[in-house]
Amino acid sequence: MNSKSSTNSRKRVAAMPPVMSEVELARLGGGEVAYIKTLSAKQASQMFPMIEGLPKGINLFSLHAADGTPIALTDTMQAAIGHAEDGELAIAPLH
């Protein structure tokens, strides 16, 4: 098989335009929706510079408002979920 037929057999995937803007997505939550993100200690230190002495080599969990504002940093997923429940926030899954 030559390179031309190999190239033709590959399908190009077009990038889909966003369904909504970042601003629209942030407004969608309206103080009712949050998400949980898994962070390394380095990422957590950058996001939460006021916290010193974060343990190295473990995952940490940050709870964020729909607009991306960090709300809490924990060492367990269960604690992050608890913070969301305490704030009466629905947790949106991230993919």
Image: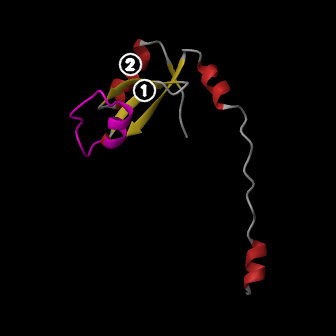
Judging by the rendered image, the residue that carries numbered circle 2 is 83
Horizontal and vertical percent for residue 44? Answer: 35, 36
Q: Which label lies toward us, 1 or 2?
A: 1
Q: Quadrant of residue 2?
A: bottom right
What colouring style does the render use? Answer: secondary structure
Q: Residues in magenta?
A: 42-58
Query: What residue is at 23 percent from the left and 31 percent from the top?
Result: 52
Between the residue at mark 1 and the residue at mark 2, the CA separation in whole angstroms equals 8 Å
Badge 1 local density, few (<14 within 10 Å), some, or many (20+)? many
Let me know if residue 40 appears in the view: no
- Where is mark 1, residue-wise? 63
Q: Is residue 67 above or below residue 13?
A: above
Q: Is residue 95 above or below residue 92?
A: below
Instruction: Pinpoint residue 63: horizontal percent, then vertical percent.
Output: 42, 26
Residue type highlighted by circle 1: Leu
Q: Is 84 or 67 nearer to us in this picture?
A: 67
Mark 1 vs 2, N-terminal side? 1
Q: Secondary structure at mark 1?
A: strand
- Does the magenta run of residues contain 57? yes
